[in-house]
Amino acid sequence: MWACPRCGKQFKNTSQSHSCGPYTEAAFLETKTPAERCLYEGFKHIIQSLGPDVRPSPAKTRIGFISTVTFAAVNRIGGGKLCGHILLHEARSDSTKFTRIEGPMTGWYIHHFCFDDMAFFDDEMVGYLMESYRSGTRKLSPGG
């Protein structure tokens, strides 16, 4: 692991590009309603239950969730919704869970989603989160 000498964030790759600064979850959430914060905390709880090494990684415009690499992120919270994305090695275009899929980008597909109720995280979505986590820890290789 490489640690940025300016901000102390740790990354898998040496000199990895990132938004270097004193970003925090509290600052990201400070203007959010109690219901929106509850959505964030619920999502964070599910993501962190995937493995003991999952940790939030606040940046300038989002909060990523990292194990070995960032595999999920919260991009926006507002209007009673939380929007984020996960990385998967295959496009799941048959699922109604995703609002948009980008890729492939170096073997990854970015799957965007928005939700306003924790019921969104049914067995299907939790399965995608686990797949993304496993990919982020390199326990699942591209195409395998």
Image (tube, rainbow, N blue to C red):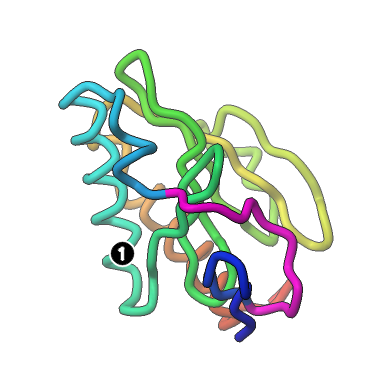
Amino acid type, mark 1: Gln
The kind of secondary structure element at disc 1 is helix
In this view of the protein, which residue sits in the foreground, 70 or 5?
A: 5
Labels in figure, total: 1
Q: Which residues are magenta?
A: 12-23
Q: Is residue 114 visible?
A: no
Residue 66 drawn above or below residue 18: below
Kindly identify which residue carries mark 1: 48
Measuring from the top left, give residue 88's x and y in whole percent: 63, 57
Measuring from the top left, give residue 61's x and y in whole percent: 55, 37
Position of 70 with respect to 142 (left or right) is left
In this view of the protein, which residue sits in the foreground, 134 or 45?
A: 45
Q: Is residue 17 magenta?
A: yes
Residue 18 drawn above or below residue 111: below
Measuring from the top left, give residue 81's x and y in whole percent: 35, 23
Q: Specify the quadrant that holds the N terminus.
A: bottom right
Q: Is residue 81 visible?
A: yes
Residue appearing at x 31%, y 35% in the figure: 29
